Each structure stands twice: as C-alpha cells, then as structure tokens.
Image (spheres, grey):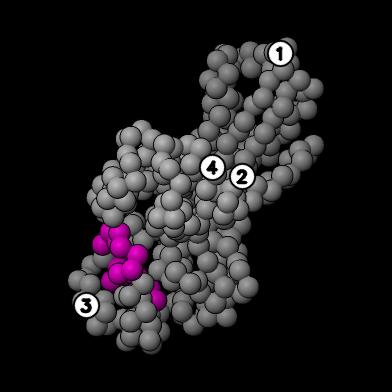
Amino acid sequence: MCCDGLENSLQGFIWRLSGAIHVDETHLESRLRSSPPLILLLDGVDYTLDPLSPEAEEICARIEEFGSYEHVCLITTSRMYPEIHGFHRVEVPTPTESGARDIFYSLCNLARSPTVDTLIAKLDFHPFSIALFARTIRENSWDEQEMLKMWDDPKGVLKTTYYEMLKNSIEPVFCSPRIKQLGAAARDVLEAIAAYPSGIGEDQLEGIFRGTGGVREVVDVLCRFSLVHRQNGVLKMLSPLQFYFLESMIVYAETEEVIKWGPDCMAAPGGMSLLLDLFRGWRMTNFSSVNLLYSRATT
C-alpha cells in the first residue's frame, strides 16, 4: 500500500488499507485476524507517522497491532526512523557499483557497455532511478544509440518521465508537518545544495544563508528525511534529487545576468537567497551549464 498523499488521519489510513486488501472498513480487523499468511507492505510512512501529525500515535498503534498478528508479516518503508514497537529495523544501503549494474541490465534489453555503465554511475546507483531508467528503455525498445540520443534530449520522454516520477516520489514529503514547519527555507536550502555538485561544507552554512535563521536545524530535518546527506563534513545530495530540484527551479533573469551579478550576490548579506531568486523558473537540464554558472558565480 502506498502511503504517499494519504489523508493524515486514522480514518484515512484505515480507508486506504481496507481498499488495498479489498475489504470493507468495518471488517478490516477481522479480515486481518483470520486471513491466510499475508505480507503487507506500507510504503512511505514518513508523513503518516510524523510525530507532528495530529493522529500519528493512533495510526502507529494500529500498525503495531496489525503487525503483532502471528500470520501477518507487516513491512514499512520510511526515509526517517519511526519508532514502531515490535518491529525490526533494516537499513537498505545504496547498491554497490557492480550490484547497480547487475540490477539495471537485468531489467532492460541492452548489452553491457562502458558507455551505459557511465550513465548508471551518473544516477549515483540510486535504486529508484536505475529501475525507472531501465523500465523506460525496455518499454520503448531502445537500443544503445537511441537511449543515448534520448538521454541528451532535455525535453525527451526519458527526462520528462524521470522528472514526473521523481516529482511523485519527492513532493509528498513536503506535506509532512515537520517539513511544513520549516517554511520556504526548506526549498531554499535544498535548491542551493542541489546547485553545488560537490556539496556545501557545514562550516559554510551561516555564511551562505545569512538571511535564513536556524539553517542548521533546517539541515538536520532535511537529513532526517534523506533529502540531504552528510559526508565528511560536507552536505551533499544524490544526483536524482539534484536533478529534480534543479529542474524545478524558476528563474526571473537571463543566464547572462546570473553570471554577471553572481559574485556580488554571494558577497552581499543574504546573497544566496538573492542568487536563488535569479535562478528560479528556468528549468535547468544541462548539469555542465549549472556547474559552470555556479563555479563562475562563486569565485
């Protein structure tokens, strides 16, 4: 059962779960108690079990109850670490390079090649991205040449499908009360980190976000939701998330103006916010251009 977009109430949860196992809401509990051995997957419970959600405790209690039934194997997936009594936590790591390649080639009809391996690496070996990439290739019966052509087409079916799927996966996270509480600062910080491919040092946060109070607390929440991760004192973002947030930006100025005013923006108080305002609205599809703009704007 997918929990994305779920009405954050016990009634909404019961309604969605009843529909998933094809039973009337009034008979849900008796059905679960008496059903044959059942594997029940609740995918993406972050928003539903957010401690700031009004009925999170009640929903969590029902999940614990259903999971306690001896013949029910109940699995939840989450970017956070919800406390559900009686459940065993299993970390799902990013696949290794060889494992990611094996997954990709097992899902599509392409022969192994160094060129394709390079594209897989650009996805940061992210399971969701690899599966989506492979499925799109398989469904369109592309060979390597066609796939490379579509990869380089910013408005092609590969990029547009990828963007929409990422949107459907990422945007529900912003419905979480914990993320909502951050206000506009959440997207400002995410867009800024996305624009730095090599990441932003944590010791640079206050200097970059002069106009954003409590930026470290904002980053802590974003890390908890796995939108950002820490690596040796540097805040980074997986390339699928980077792609999405860069694509979602809006720009109110021409690229040349961004380059022209970039250094002055960065030197001024609140400079990052101003620079982000310049970038928003332009759907950036060429990472090399983005890297160039920011390397020139920050020197």
The residue pinned by badge 1 equals: 36
Residue at 28% across, 55% down: 152
Residue at 54% across, 61% down: 228
Disc sitting over residue 257 in the figure: 3
| Mark found first going from the N terminus, 3 or 4 | 4
The residue pinned by badge 2 equals: 78
- Mark 2 Cα within 10 Å, few/some/many (few <14, many 20+)? some
- In magenta stretch: residue 275: yes
Image spot of residue 138 (x, y percent):
38, 35
Real-space Cα separation, disc 3 to disc 1, in angstroms? 65 Å
Q: Secondary structure at mark 3?
A: helix
Image spot of residue 265 (x, y percent):
33, 82
Kind of residue at badge 3: Glu
| Mark found first going from the N terminus, 3 or 1 | 1
- The relative height of residue 89 versus residue 118 in the rendered view (above or below) is above
Kind of residue at badge 2: Ser
Residue at 54% across, 35% down: 3
The secondary structure that most of the magenta stretch takes on is helix
